[in-house]
């Protein structure tokens, strides 16, 4: 019998009495299909606490308890090192590699930046002041105390933090500098629940949230342009969508630079030869480059830079 902390118990409420066991558990395990629930039951990792035999078609009674053994899933491989740009008594500024999530999730419970940082600074209260996508490389700010975290997050919400990103995009944007002002909203009915889109100008029911990005082309190669992006708002996937909206999507962006067909092919095959021809890079070529804010100790403005990630630089240089 597994240890108690490896077992989850589900008590059947009155409203669920009489349901099949697989239907009841499907309601409790929202992210798992009913077919998967059936296979879990049939594998013997679920049982009635009373000792009654459990099968997918068993009817559950009010107050009855179904036990489930937690199966610890093997986490995907992620980079386990990060660069330290600056550290003092109040803050830690790091250069995060692409592929490393910034915070724990069910899939990346141990393999994430915050967990790695807390291991190295045991006994300290370390918290993220902001987030960047797992595939995005570059600068991340971490506070070493709760008051510092509060002060810095307040600056983010009041738009006093200045930040820039470097993006390798397809084609050569014209004009070479400008501003994209396009409201963003969650894509209705998207199979990928995190996918966003530019809201239609005449959309009444969901006009989206205002989003503004300034950009400037720094260098060009045969097929690509290296662009500095300055988000004035902080919407989800903002730079990625705005560059795609300009007609110059970010290289390697599986949500906004290629078809959904290519995205699903990538999830099946990984970065295969055929997928590589479409994506160029196995991750989106977006890098958090600079960050400027008021230091929680001195209240003076400080600025930090994370040099462009080597994989993006290599693709760009090889295209010249």
Image (tube, rainbow, N blue to C red):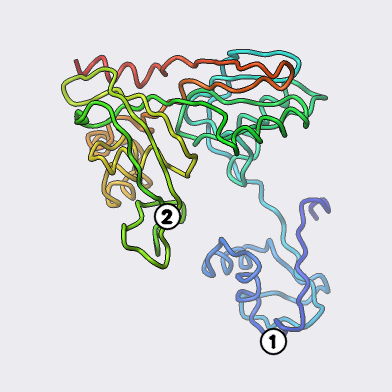
Callouts 2 and 1 close, C-beta under 8 Å: no
Counting other residues with Cα less than 10 Å from the Cα at mark 2, is it few (<14), some (14-19), or many (20 or more)? many
Residue appearing at x 58%, y 66% in the figure: 37
- Viewed as shown, does residue 149 lie left or right of 23? right
Q: Where does residue 47 sit, x and y in percent of width and height?
A: 74, 68
The image shows residue 181, relative to residue 19, as above or below, that is above
- Viewed as shown, does residue 298 lie left or right of 168? right
Extreme-left residue of the structure: 222
| Depth check, front residue: 313 or 99 | 313
Q: Where does residue 129 sit, x and y in percent of width and height?
A: 64, 32
Extreme-bottom residue of the structure: 18
- Viewed as shown, does residue 232 lie left or right of 65? left
Q: Where does residue 142 sit, x and y in percent of width and height?
A: 66, 26
The image shows residue 250, relative to residue 306, as above or below, that is below
Counting other residues with Cα less than 10 Å from the Cα at mark 1, is it few (<14), some (14-19), or many (20 or more)? some
Residue appearing at x 57%, y 30% in the figure: 160
Quadrant assignment, res 172: top left
Which labelled disc corresponds to residue 245? none
Q: Secondary structure at mark 2?
A: strand
Q: Quadrant of the C terminus?
A: top left
| Depth check, front residue: 91 or 233 | 233
Residue appearing at x 58%, y 33% in the figure: 102
Please state which of the two labelled residues, at mark 2 or mark 1, is closer to the viewer. Answer: 2
Q: Secondary structure at mark 1?
A: loop
Which labelled disc corresponds to residue 185? 2
Q: Which residue is mark 1?
A: 18
- Viewed as shown, does residue 95 lie left or right of 27? left
Q: CA distance from mark 2 to mark 1?
A: 41 Å
Q: Where does residue 146 sit, x and y in percent of width and height?
A: 77, 32
* First-in-chain label (2 vs 1): 1
The image shows residue 123, relative to residue 8, as above or below, that is above
Q: Quadrant of the N terminus?
A: bottom right
């Amino acid at each position: 019998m597994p240890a108690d902390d490896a077992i989850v118990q589900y008590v059947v409420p009155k409203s669920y009495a009489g349901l099949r066991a697989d239907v009841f558990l499907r309601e409790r395990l929202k992210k798992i299909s009913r077919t998967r629930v059936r296979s879990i039951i049939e594998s013997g990792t679920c049982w009635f606490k009373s000792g009654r035999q459990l099968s997918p078609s068993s009817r559950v009674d009010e107050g009855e308890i179904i036990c489930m053994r937690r199966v610890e899933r093997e986490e995907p491989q992620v980079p386990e090192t990060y660069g330290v740009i600056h550290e003092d008594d109040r803050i830690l500024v790091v250069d995060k590699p692409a592929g490393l999530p910034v915070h724990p999730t069910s899939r990346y419970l141990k393999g994430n930046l915050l967990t790695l940082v807390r291991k190295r600074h045991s006994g300290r209260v370390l918290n993220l002041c902001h987030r960047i996508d797992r595939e995005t490389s570059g600068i991340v700010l971490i506070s070493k105390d709760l008051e510092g975290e509060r002060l810095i997050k307040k600056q983010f919400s009041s738009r006093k933090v200045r930040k820039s990103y470097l993006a390798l995009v397809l084609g050569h944007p014209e004009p070479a500098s400008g501003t994209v002002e396009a409201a963003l909203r969650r894509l209705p009915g998207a199979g990928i629940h995190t996918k966003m889109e530019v809201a239609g100008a005449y959309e009444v029911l969901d006009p989206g949230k205002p989003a503004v990005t300034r950009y400037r082309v720094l260098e060009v190669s045969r097929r690509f342009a290296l662009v500095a992006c300055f988000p004035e708002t902080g919407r989800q996937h903002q730079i990625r969508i705005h560059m795609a909206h300009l007609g110059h999507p970010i290289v390697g962006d599986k949500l906004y630079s290629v078809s959904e067909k290519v995205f699903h092919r990538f999830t099946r095959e990984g970065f295969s030869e055929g997928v590589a021809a479409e994506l160029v890079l196995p991750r989106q070529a977006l890098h958090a480059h600079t960050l400027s804010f008021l230091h929680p100790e001195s209240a003076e403005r400080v600025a930090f830079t994370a040099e462009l990630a080597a994989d993006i630089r290599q693709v760009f240089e090889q295209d010249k």
